Amino acid sequence: MTKKAKANNTSPPPPDFEKSLAELEQIVARMEGGELSLDESLQQFEKGVALARACQQALQTAEQKVEILLKKSGKDAFETTPFAVEDDLIDE
């Protein structure tokens, strides 16, 4: 198999969670600043939604890995629960 064929068979690595989160925070700050045009705001919003989805997927994957590791270690007594969302974060 050629290098090009091998490259086509592999998917790109998932985005780094911390980088995606930092970029999402920057987008939010720019949008809250109110200095973007409508078109720029829409572009940033679309990018932010994609980043938020990628971050959520990364968190779900991490949670699944933790659950698998706990089950393998025989720690079935542990139970994962979602984080509570604080009301003041939603209102911002």
Image (cartoon, rainbow, N blue to C red):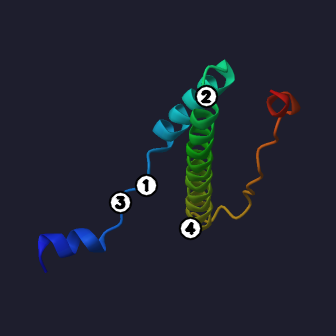
Q: Position of residue 8 (x, y in %)?
A: 27, 71
Viewer-nearest of discs 1 and 4: 1
Above/below status of 35 relative to 19: above
Of the residues under marks 3 and 2, which one precedes in the sequence?
Answer: 3
N-term mark: 1 or 4: 1
In this rendering, which labeled residue sits more in front, label 2 or label 1? Answer: 2
- The residue tagged 3 is 12
Left or right? Give the position of 22 relative to 75.
left
Indicate the quadrant containing the N terminus: top left, top right, bottom left or bottom right: bottom left
**Secondary structure type for disc 2:** loop
Disc 2 marks a residue whose amino acid type is Ser
| Residue type of the residue flagged with mark 1 | Pro
Mark 1 touching mark 4, by CB under 8 A? Answer: no
Separation of residues labelled 3 and 1 (CA atoms): 6 Å
The residue carrying mark 4 is 72
Q: Residue furthest left?
A: 2
The residues tagged by marks 4 and 2 sit, at their Cα atoms, a distance apart of 52 Å
The residue type indicated by label 4 comes to Lys
Q: Which residue is mark 1?
A: 14
Q: Residue at x 29, y 74 (%)?
A: 9
Residue 86 horizontal side relative to residue 63, left or right: right
Query: Residue 18 location, x and y as percent?
Result: 49, 37
CA gap, disc 1 and disc 4: 25 Å
Q: Which residue is identified by label 2? A: 37
70 and 74: which is toward the camera: 70
Pointers 3 and 1 in contact (C-beta within 8 Å):
yes
Q: How busy is the neighbourhood of tag 2: few (under 14 within 10 Å), some, or many (20 plus)?
A: few
